[in-house]
Image (spheres, rainbow, N blue to C red):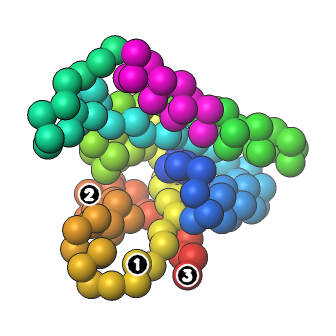
Amino acid sequence: MYKCIVLAYDGSEAGQLALLESRELAQWSQAVVWLVAVMPSPANLAGYDGSIYIPEIAERDKQRFQSILDDGLRRMTSAGYQAQGELLMGESVHQITEFARKVQANLIVVGHKHLESWAARWWRGSVSSALIEHAHCSVLCVITQ
């Protein structure tokens, strides 16, 4: 059924539940698993307050996102699963869907946390909802409360 699974991993509680879910799916279907972490591009790191792009801060952020990805890979391998990882840079939905297309994924797994208020949902948007709209393959949203 699923031969290639892409897990959008951000280290959050929802992301960790998605990691567990993807491990079970990978075992069941003997799929290749790719963990991806998406870092905003440096242009997106500049604030609306007129802040300036500083290479040292960008490098620190890159190391933080790489650490999140490495943590997910460590969790997979310590549980006996094989997974590959990729640090992507740019807008999350676009990067995840393009990567999934590139590796010919059959499934994208993403964690999703229900937000308490309509204002929070409107302001932050939903990566999982956007993935469902833009992905070429199935999307599994692992929900936390």
Amino acid at pointer 3: Gln
Note whether 3 is above or below 29 in the view shown. Answer: above
Q: Could you tell me which secondary element the residue under label 1 belongs to?
A: loop
Label 1 close to label 3 by CB (< 8 Å)? no
Give the dominant element type of the magenta stretch: helix, strand or loop: helix
Label 3 close to label 2 by CB (< 8 Å)? no
* Residue 71 in sight from this viewpoint: yes
Residue under the image location 27 percent in, 34 percent down? 45
Q: Residue furthest bottom?
A: 117
Amino acid at pointer 1: Leu
Q: Quick check: 124 left or right of 16?
A: left
Magenta highlight range = 56-68
Q: Quick check: 61 left or right of 127?
A: right
For this rendering, which residue is in front, 15 or 21?
Answer: 15
Note whether 97 is above or below 46 in the view shown. Answer: below
Asked if the stretch drawn in magenta spans residue 25, the answer is no
For this rendering, which residue is in front, 12 or 109?
Answer: 12
Q: Which residue is mark 2?
A: 134
- Of labels 2 and 1, earlier in sequence is 1
Q: Which residue is mark 3?
A: 145
* Residue 1 position in % (x across, y down): 60, 60
Residue under the image location 40 percent in, 36 percent down? 39
